[in-house]
Image: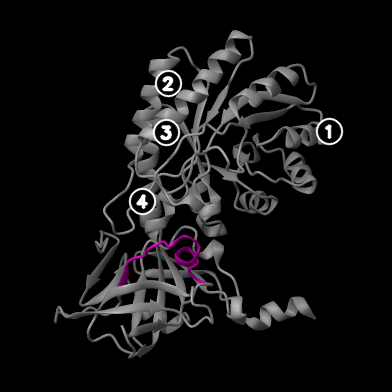
Amino acid sequence: MTTLLNEQLNYRDNQLQLESCNLSSVAQQVPTPFYGYSKARILQNTARCQAAFAAHNIDIHYAMKANSNLHILRLIGSQGLGVDTVSAGEIQRAIAAGIPAEQIIFSGVGKSAAEIRLALNTGIGQFNVESAEELALLGTLAQAHTQPVKVALRVNPDVAVNTHRHITTGTRGNKFGMPPEQALQLFRDYADHSCLNLCGLAMHIGSQICDAAPYGQAVSRLLALTKTLEAEDIHILCLDLGGGFGIDYGNGRSLSFSEVAAVIADTINTEVPEYDGKVVVEPGRSLIADAGLLVTRVNFVKEAEPRPFLILDAAMNDLMRPALYQAEHPLLPVRHTDDGGFRQLDVVGPVCESTDTFARDYPVPNDVQADDLMAFLCAGAYCSVMSNSYNSRDIAAEVLIDQDTFQVIRRPVSQDDLMAFED
């Protein structure tokens, strides 16, 4: 497994630094575990994404389910990106962060009536509708509004991708989207609806995908439907192609923005060269994951057979991905030594669950001991947003690092804070 050190994350004077900020120093002021994010890395990732897709006139909406901290949203929004949301709460966060309502897309398979009303009242730019039942409800609720609501129907293109079964979303049997033939019939049925403007097609085929080919296959299937609709004088003004671009978690596998952009553009230019509508992608993880760390402290090195345990103060409530879908996050000591010796340990947390295991048979420096600091890499996406208080544990703080300074952007949520809701 590669260490994934880069210009923002490196050792200086044998101490791990994010940008120019010594993580040991941060840990003296912020209780562990905590999440730390590099502002420079987020901006760098966003700029690379913009350069790749702007070359093909493709718009970008950040999939904020990856990380919805208000400070992160403000930072990404300041670069001109819209957002893709999947709940009323995310819409509220987007608005609070200053994202223009017309730059908000509302996706999600199970939107409630209350969520739809909030989105309508907010004036969001587009609903990505996932079922006939949802479309009917939206049509009823939209009658209270004077302007027609822009709608894209999410199509399930039934394209297999090489990713974990829990994060594939675009094959037959997934709960997301609808078959192309059902979408075609809904476009026909709602062609003259007074409150709904069905003008887009959407898809999302999965997450952590490291091969561009499935995007070409899925886009091709959306374009086939687009041509059928155009032949019936139904115009598609937006193709929302989702995200899921894989990043390197230490295995050397990833998918670059430029690869995806080229495949999308080549497919459209080959199959429907006359298409002049908007094209949208929704990256999340690929903008934020490698900008984040989870800094944790060693509670014990427990000698045991067949392997010792490295017991950390971070747990599955702080980093759910390994328990949910066997994800692997590289782990580095914050204090670097040059002896070069390692031994194989099982890396675990203190929660009373056997699934509270981050890695098995993992190489850890020989001299790591209790009270040392460690850092899980690539923890910027789907980590803090999945955190919880299981075992009545505090919810970890979040810190944004800018060169040699840091700002706490979410303070720890203590048990006193949580118990106040139960009074």
Q: CA distance from mark 4 to mark 1?
A: 41 Å
**Could you say whether the residue bearing mark 3 is in a helix, strand or loop?**
helix
Return the residue found at the far left: 339
Which tag, 2 or 1, sits closer to the chain's start? Answer: 1
- Label 3 or label 1, whichever lies nearer to me, is 3
Return the residue found at the far right: 144
Residue range corresponding to the magenta coloring: 318-332
Residue at 63% x, 9% y: name it. Answer: 232
Q: CA distance from mark 2 to mark 1?
A: 34 Å
Which residue does the numbered mark 2 point to in the structure image? Answer: 268
**In the displayed structure image, the side of residue 306 where residue 398 appears, left or right:** right
Which residue does the numbered mark 1 point to in the structure image? Answer: 140
Q: How is the image coloured?
A: one colour
Name which residue type carries label 2. Ile
Name which residue type carries label 3. Tyr
Disc on res. 247: 4
Q: Position of residue 93 (x, y in %)?
A: 63, 54
- Which of the 4 quarters of the picture holds residue 257? top left
Residue at 46% x, 12% y: name it. Answer: 274
Which residue does the numbered mark 3 point to in the structure image? Answer: 215
Disc on res. 125: none
- Which of the 4 quarters of the picture holds residue 216? top left
Which tag, 2 or 3, sits closer to the chain's start? Answer: 3
Name which residue type carries label 4. Ile
